[in-house]
Amino acid sequence: MDPISRPAIVIDNGTGYTKMGFAGNVEPCFVQPTVVAVNDSFVNQPRSAVKNNNWLAQHSAGVMADLDFFIGDEGISRSRSSNAYNLSYPIKYGQVENWDAMERYWQQCIFNYLRCDPEDHYFLLTESPLTAPESREYTGEIMFETFNVPGLYIAVQPVLALAAGYTTSKCEMTGVVVDVGEGATHVVPVADGYVIGSSIRSIPLSGKDVTLFIQQLMRERGEHIPPEDSLDVARKVKESYCYTCSDIVKEYKKHDKEPAKYIKQWRGIKPKTGAPYTCDVGYERFLGPEIFFSPEIYSGELTSSLPEVIDKCIQSTPIDTRRALYKNIVLSGGSTMFKDFHRRLQRDVKKLVDARVLASDALGIGGIKAKPVEVNVVSHPIQRCAVWFGGSVLASTPEFFQACHTKAEYEEHGASICRTNPVFKGMYLYR
């Protein structure tokens, strides 16, 4: 059967989690942590352990090392139950750092989870903004050489998130994507589907920092959490109990006035002994997400809040696009799912914009008053998987197959063809 007649495979690799599935679906088939557990006992065994340096035994050990690995939740559980497995995180801060581990991860995604033949499907993979062109070449080499895929398209994650907003709220393909992932936060302006590369901004705060801050707060308060379990507990507290407040001082007063109403209880089981334990979840419920709006409470080196970064990003774009960008600020990523996050972000950005308009009116240049600027932050139920959903929508259009780089083109021109990816269907995927 012709690969074009089969649904394309969409894989969104993130620092924390990877979403994978088939084009045309509303949700990914699998969401797994981006981690590989490799059995190093085969590779690290001393040569004396192999009698007479038997080359066949050494070869077998190498083959077993290549085969004996696990990914995602299964890999994490294997590393906890056996010291032979070491965890490897192939993606850090949105960029692939370990290509061998990444290749193994894709192998398991395709054969173990999606259970398909890569030669029968076109592939859409995602990448972080500001990714080096060489990274696209490595991706193309692995996909075409190792998996022999018939076609490949590499899309920028924020543009796919904007495409997801297009399908859900009928907005234009002009807007600012605020992508807050596990390992990186990017603010990416898009005009008519094209990324304005010179205006991309990023801040060194992400979902992982929220987790670490909650872990630090609970540790400083003296909660009795097993050290080996503290990071996992902090992550679960973040996902289950955290919310965004409108005023941090008022929130402190509310918690102090009615602690029974706002303080939650976390119940867990110690991994080593199996004994149950409990701990309180208090101020960290609102202090965790607050680091995006008041970063100085987390680190004295950070001075710019997320609303300020968004405002500076839009102000650095061409002047004729700014009103449209303020009108369509789209959220993407699991760390934007905190309750009332979009309302707080819209309020703070609006304050900055209104202050600038008032300052302009006070100058009274030419006696002309500036028109109010509409600020709108778009939030929708699928923003956790917005990138994957946008890829699913675009990969299910006929134009997608025409825009893909094919195996024949790769063999003729080499991996350099993956450096650029053509625009298609006015839904515009950049580079």
Image: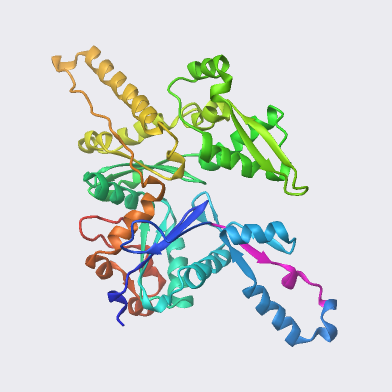
- Which residue is nearer to you in this view: 227 or 137? 227
The structure residue drawn at horizontal position 22% and vertical position 44%, both measured from the top left corner, is: 171
Q: Residue at x 75, y 43 (%)?
A: 275
Position of 112 with respect to 343 (left or right) is right
Q: Give the residue drawn at x 72%, y 29%.
A: 222
Residue 330 in the figure: left or right of residue 270: left
The answer to whether 274 appears left or right of 396 in the picture is right
Quadrant holding the N terminus = bottom left
41 is within the stretch colored magenta: yes
Q: Position of residue 367 (x, y in %)?
A: 14, 14
Residue 300 is at least partly visible in this image: no
Magenta span covers which residues? Answer: 34-47
Residue 312: image location, x then y, percent? 36, 32
Q: Quadrant of residue 227?
A: top right
Above or below, 137 against 356 in this view is: below
Q: Is 82 contained in the magenta span?
A: no
Where residue 30 appears, as percent x and y from the top left, is 46, 60
Q: Nearer the viewer, residue 172 or 129?
A: 172
Which quarter of the figure has residue 276?
A: top right
Q: Quadrant of the C terminus?
A: bottom left
Compared to residue 420, the image places residue 299 above or below, namely: above
Q: In the image, residue 166 lies at what x, y percent?
A: 25, 48
Residue extending farthest to the left is 367
